[in-house]
Amino acid sequence: MDKEKIKKLAGSKQFITGIYNYCDQWCERCPFTSRCLNFALGEEQFADPQSRDIANEVFWQKLAETFQGSLDLLGETAEREGIDLDALDTDELAEEQRANEEVAENHECCRAARTYGEMVDDWFDSATDLFGQKEEETNLNVLHDIPNVSPFGEGAGFEEAVQVVRWYQQLIYAKLMRAMRGQLEEKPEIHDEFASDWDGSAKVALIAIDRSIAAWGEIRSHYPLDDSDILDLMVYLDRLRRRVEKVFPGARGFIRPGFDKVRLHS
């Protein structure tokens, strides 16, 4: 895709600015794909069924075209804004990024989220008798990201809960890492004037935790004979939730473009 097509799509008023920055990347369950630029770019770029196959050369050709178009657009924008793309001190920046990455990885919330991911794998490894078919083969349909609608409404069940747990298993860690890195990198004067991007990432992590707790509760109702391990997972997640809320006190109140409605006070 060339830069003119990218610019034309980006300029469309149908898209909600920045909505893709604060989503959980579960496009199949999202009611806002028609208003998401990232989704539209993907659909435009990979409309050919062959291009969706990562083993197919067409996929990589399409990806290279997107890269070149994005690069051309970046150069054009940098020239217009007076940005010198060659002036970056890459060594200093790389060192700062490495230091921030290490701090983020060792933060208690990120360590706990990583441990949770391992706990989930351990539980599924030990609970193979629960599944009558491979987990990847389940055909699931769960409500997702619709305001005021629980992901576990009428008709939801065990398989739906399994997919929710599996989808958010690693995303919690990824979003908390993004939140921690943002918190480390953001300048205080910017934070005072604008809502923090890292609060948005932390909110997505909290939503993922909330939904995972709900999913484990559903799984537990189908596994009543020995639910101590499931209860341990739920308690662990709830403690993580409480800690994240303390570390990111503004996260719950962050207004995600498209997903959250602004409440007006009279």
Image: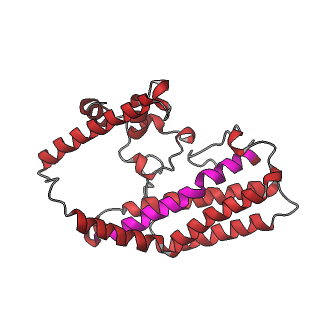
Give how far across and how far down residue 209 sits, in percent: 60, 61
The reply to whether residue 40 is visible in this rendering is yes
**Is 230 included in the stretch rendered in magenta?**
no
Residue 153 appearing in the image = no
From the viewer's perspective, is 131 left or right of 199? Answer: right
Q: Residue 214: which quarter of the image?
A: bottom right
Q: Nearer the viewer, residue 93 or 220?
A: 93
Please give the name of the residue rendered at 79% of the width and 47% of the height, measured from the top-left corner.
131
What is the x, y in percent for residue 260? 47, 51
Compared across the picture, whether 85 is left or right of 65 comes to left
Q: Is residue 105 above or below residue 42?
A: below
- Tag count: 0
Task: Write the residue at 39% across / 30% down.
Answer: 45
Image quarter hosting the N terminus: top left
| Relative to 75, 120 lies left or right | right
- Residue that appears at 45% across and 24% down: 48
Chief SS of the magenta region: helix
**Closer to us: 113 or 145:** 113
Could you tell me residue 72's position as x and y percent? 21, 38
Q: Residue at x 44, y 70 (%)?
A: 104
Quadrant that contains the C terminus = bottom left
- Residues shaded magenta: 159-187
Task: Looking at the picture, tell me which residue is in the foreground, 265 or 91.
Answer: 91
Question: Magenta includes 176?
Answer: yes
Residue 207's quadrant in the figure?
bottom right
Look at the image and name its color scheme: secondary structure
Residue at the far right: name it: 225
Q: Is residue 170 above or below residue 14?
A: below
Relative image position of residue 263 (x, y in whole percent):
45, 55
